Image (spheres, helix red, strand yellow):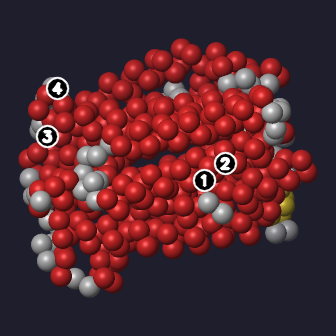
Amino acid sequence: MNKNFTEKSKWTTIGIILSLAWPTILEQVMQTAVQYIDTAMVGSLGTYATAAVGATTTLGWLVNSTTTALGIGFLSYIAKACGAGDRESAKKTTAQSVLVTLISGVLFTIILLSVSPYIPTLMQVDPNIRIITSQYFFILYMPMLPRAATAIFGTVLRAAGDTKTPMKVGALVNVINVVLNFFLIYETRTVKCFSALVTIPGAGFGVIGAATASAIAFFVGGILITVALWNHKMVSPKGYSLKPDKTILKPCLRIALPNMLQRFATTLGYVAFAAMINSLGEVSTAAHTVANTVESAFYIPGYGMQAAAATLTGNAYGAKDNKRMKSIANMFLPIEIILMTLSGAALFFMAPWLVSLFADNKEVMTLGITVLRMVAVSEPFYGLPIVIEGMMQGVGKTRQPFVYNVIGMWGIRIIGTFICINLLGLDLISAWACMIAHNLLLFVMYLITFVRGKWNPLNRKEN
């Protein structure tokens, strides 16, 4: 980063922030668009198909969050090295990330494929769809090694300031997924194109076809991101040893472990949350799945800015430039709040139309619209913790976010939902109210941390 960064105008600072954020935001937009298309395609098969696919979604978050957390450990170390201009350390660290990717990818593949027959029972899935749910899960996680590579190597590239390569790889993966969905989900059919009748071949695999399409796309994505990393000038591991290096792994894992525990604990909370919702029946499960799918698009500005915040604060920390650090932090928050306010307003007004894309059952639609409009109001409050957590990740501060998220998830969302559903006999609306309360608590805790300035290690060095 330019040493004259702090002398630049606010508009230039905003430009730098957005130049890093927009590829990640666009990448997530494309991923969400594909998720929308997947849900709509599968949803056309019936409510049972939507429920079968959605029943294990949160368990997938649990797995993916672990590999993402490993990437966060390397992100802080590499961003700091790049900020200090130390390419040698950055490349050595990348080589260690390859080792961790291989170990975690193989380990997760063995574990997930072994437990797939028992997942539907664990998740309290309706007995009528347990077999298809298990098959879907098994196929989806066969390419776990390429999925781990996509998560970890993508984070390494972003740490080096390259957010465009993960975006391009993600775009191609999404195109492959959609195209294969089109041919694998449906039977061979004849459609009218202008005045001509066109026969489109199809395998007619239904839910299994959707899983197969995703698995192939993930496999291709893993190969492409690995090739991109290997040829990257700043962080290529080419020529560096893959043997364990304690001097690198120890500080990286010290950062990654709290983040991994945070993601594991919170995502395990999502699993428990989904299991309680699944116990409410097929309609609630389908409405929850549809609402989750719709809502995911409106978190995108927050998480896109989080990636940029982690990279820029990590660079400033490596350069030991506290003026730049404070300038970045003070610019991120208002941008984030504006983006998430606009996002929340769009979600509130567009909820009926968006839900109608994925469901035609009136009960499912009414329930989905209600919970989406509830959560839309809390979007600005949820955005601020996301970007502050990104800044803390950039400087290697991952312990406090772990504590905050565990308190919010288990102390508010899970206990509250258990009381509402199992003791008071309430429905999906009460569960989402508990989720909103969880988000508001995170807002308060992260705001206090930011105002006190304890998230920034350079503050202590000035005192």
Label 3: how many Cα within 10 Å (few below 14, some 14–19, many 20+): many
Q: Earlier in the sequence, mark 1 or mark 3?
A: 3
When the figure is inspected, residue 377 is found, relative to residue 146, above or below; the finding is below
Q: Tell me the number on the disc at residue 296.
A: 1
Q: CA distance from mark 4 to mark 3?
A: 11 Å
Q: Secondary structure at mark 3?
A: helix
Q: Are discs 1 and 4 less than 8 Å apart at CB?
A: no
Side of 437 where 223 appears, left or right: left
Identify the amino acid type marked 4. Pro
- In the picture, the quarter occupied by the N terminus is bottom left
Residue at coordinates 59% horizontally, 61% vertically from top-left?
379
Q: Picture coordinates of residue 425 (x, y %)?
A: 83, 33
Q: Are discs 1 and 3 less than 8 Å apart at CB?
A: no
Identify the amino acid type marked 3. Lys
Q: Are discs 4 and 3 less than 8 Å apart at CB?
A: no
Q: Earlier in the sequence, mark 2 or mark 3?
A: 3
Q: Taking the image as drawn, is residue 186 in sight?
A: no
Residue on which the image places disc 3: 92
Q: Are discs 1 and 2 less than 8 Å apart at CB?
A: yes
Label 2: how many Cα within 10 Å (few below 14, some 14–19, many 20+): some
Near-viewer residue (419 or 54): 419
